Structure formats: C-alpha cells, structure tokens
Image (cartoon, helix red, strand yellow):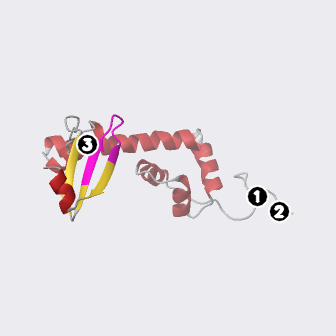
C-alpha cells in the first residue's frame, strides 16, 4: 500500500492550483463560491476547505469581506460618475435609489367627492370614499331620464 506524500495528501489526484488574487477579484465582483470553484475546476466543498486552510478564516466571513469591498468600489465609482463627471442619468438614478426621489406626481383627489362621466349612453358616477376605495355606479342615460333631471 503506497504511503503518504510529504504534503500529507494521499497518493492520487494532485491538488488544484488556485490563484488567490483571481479568487479575490471574483469575490469583489460578486461571484458565488460555487462559480469560483467551477472557474478553477474544483468541487465547491474543496474550494471552501482550501479557503479555510489558506486564509485561516471561514469561507462565509471571507466572502462577506470581499463582497463588501466590491460594493464600496462600485458605490464610489457611481458617485464619481454622477457628481464629478456630471452624468445626469446617474444623478437621477442615485437620487431615486438613495434618496427615494421619484418623478411621479401624486394627485390628491380629496376635494372631489364625485366625478360623473357620460360615455356611450351610460352615466358613470365615481365616488371616492374615506378608505380611498372607488365605488362606481352605472346608470343608463335615456332621453327620458335626461328630461327628468332638467
């Protein structure tokens, strides 16, 4: 029976070479551990174990640290594009997402209690109620009923 190699690994498939700079770059970019493992052609469990062995920290906290760095770089780049380069599209986008700004106009119908719309022989009375629900009443408008309202 063959013995162990000096590395402590049993005889068999050699360990995959992992470029840790590339791993960091992929994590900063937001790639998942399974995607990074596939990139290097290794099983995710092997990748997670190798992170712990090489970095001395669990996979999840290591990933969170790198992903936070990527988020910070992205935010800084967006801010730079919007403010320093005066990119109005990015300014609008940041305003909507960071400041909850909107380009919708809210119309308050509090003053109107009823709106009447006459359309194709029907009269529709739309009433706004306290809970902002809309109640629609439809009545047939005939020549006789028009004469009754005069």
Q: From the top left corner, tell me how far across and down residue 117 is, in percent.
A: 20, 54
Residue 111 lies within the magenta run = no
Label 1 sits on residue? 10
Q: Give how far apart the Cα atoms at labels 2 and 3 are.
A: 65 Å
Q: Which residue is mark 3?
A: 96
Q: Which residue is mark 2?
A: 2
Chain part drawn in magenta? 124-135
Dot 1 or dot 2: first in sequence order is 2
Of the image marks 1 and 3, the number of the one nearer the N terminus: 1
Q: CA distance from mark 1 to mark 2?
A: 8 Å
- Closer to the camera in the image, 28 or 136: 136
23 and 91: which one is in front?
Answer: 91
Q: Residue at x 32, y 45 (%)?
A: 74
Closer to the observer: label 1 or label 2? 1
Q: Give the CA distance from mark 1 to mark 3.
A: 57 Å
Which mark lies nearer to you, 2 or 3?
Answer: 3
């Amino acid at each position: 029976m063959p013995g162990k190699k000096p590395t402590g690994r049993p005889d068999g498939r050699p360990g995959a070479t992992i470029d840790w700079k590339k791993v960091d770059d992929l994590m900063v970019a937001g790639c998942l551990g399974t995607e990074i493992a596939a990139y290097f052609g290794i099983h995710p469990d092997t990748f997670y174990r190798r992170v712990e062995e090489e970095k001395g920290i669990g996979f999840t906290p290591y990933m969170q640290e790198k992903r936070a760095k990527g988020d910070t770089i992205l935010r800084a780049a967006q801010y730079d594009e919007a403010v320093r380069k005066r990119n109005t599209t990015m300014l609008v986008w940041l305003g909507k997402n960071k400041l909850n700004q909107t380009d919708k106009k809210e119309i308050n119908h509090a003053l109107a209690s009823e709106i009447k719309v006459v359309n194709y022989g029907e009269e529709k009375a739309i009433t706004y109620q306290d809970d902002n629900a809309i109640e629609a009443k439809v009545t047939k408008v005939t020549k006789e009923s028009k004469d009754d309202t005069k």
